[in-house]
Amino acid sequence: MAFTPRIDAALRYACAVLEDSQADRLPVDPIAVAASAGISVLPFSQVTQNAAWDPWNLNAALGMSHATTISYPGFCVIYRDEVQDAGRLRWAVAHELGHLFLNHFRDYPDQMSPGFSADSGLEAEADIFARNLLAPVPLVDVIRYNRPRQARAPLFGLSRSAWMRRLETLAEDRSFLSAEMADAVLYPFRSYLLKRRCARCGRVFEDRRDAGRCPGCKGEELEWLLE
Ligand SMILES: [Zn+2]
Ligand SMILES: [Zn+2]
């Protein structure tokens, strides 16, 4: 019987990990997030250079996915650095972090052997974690509300299909999110979200009080920078 994904746990862990990582702009870099949590993430080319290190079943695992996690000698995420698609790599690494932070290796070791497919419920949990790490609901909501045309896959560094899935699951994920969690996710991104450029005089500034007005020329036509 398939394991039922724990949306609430996956979402809570993603919010907490994002907050701890001090990520403050998009796209979220899962390799930096991993580094801040002390998790090693290595490109496959580096592993193949080391003749003494030949993790079991690594080739099979990486044939199935753009990234995988090995648990010996220590937990380590390995990604296929020859892959040029940054969005898919970002997703694959974030998904592996989901397995790690949700303790799938500790609690379901028989499911997590490299080169084998885990239970679909565990995979779904890792995906819930990944989408809420890379495109957290509060950030997606704020940007979509204020700048719907900028709220698109490239801003979050996602593939188009991952972004479509993010939109499909937005309401469900939001139902597990408290106001406190949303505030905690948004807070580190405040400078990023408040940066504006005045269309009249070109001044770039943070609209901290949400005045909607350029402090220089008092122009009211402000562009969101999100860069
Ligand atoms: Zn997985
Ligand atoms: Zn101005």
Image (cartoon, rainbow, N blue to C red):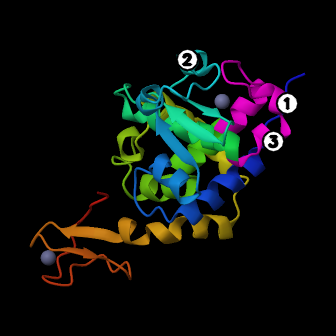
Helix, strand or loop at label 2? It is helix
Q: How far from the left and from the top, in percent, is residue 8?
A: 76, 50
Residue 6 x, y percent position in the rendering: 79, 43
Q: Residue at x 67, y 39 (%)?
A: 73
**Quarter of the N terminus within the rendering:** top right
What are the residue bounds of the magenta stretch? 101-126
Q: Nearer the viewer, mark 1 or mark 3?
A: 3
Give the labeled residue for mark 2: 59
Q: Please, what secondary structure does the residue beneath circle 3 have?
A: helix
Q: Is residue 17 visible?
A: yes
The 10 Å Cα crowd at callout 1, few under 14, some 14 to 19, many 20 or more, is few
Upstream in sequence: badge 1 or badge 3:
1
Q: Earlier in the sequence, mark 2 or mark 3?
A: 2
For marks 1 and 2, give the CA distance. 27 Å
Identify the disc placed on residue 208.
Answer: none
SS at badge 1: loop
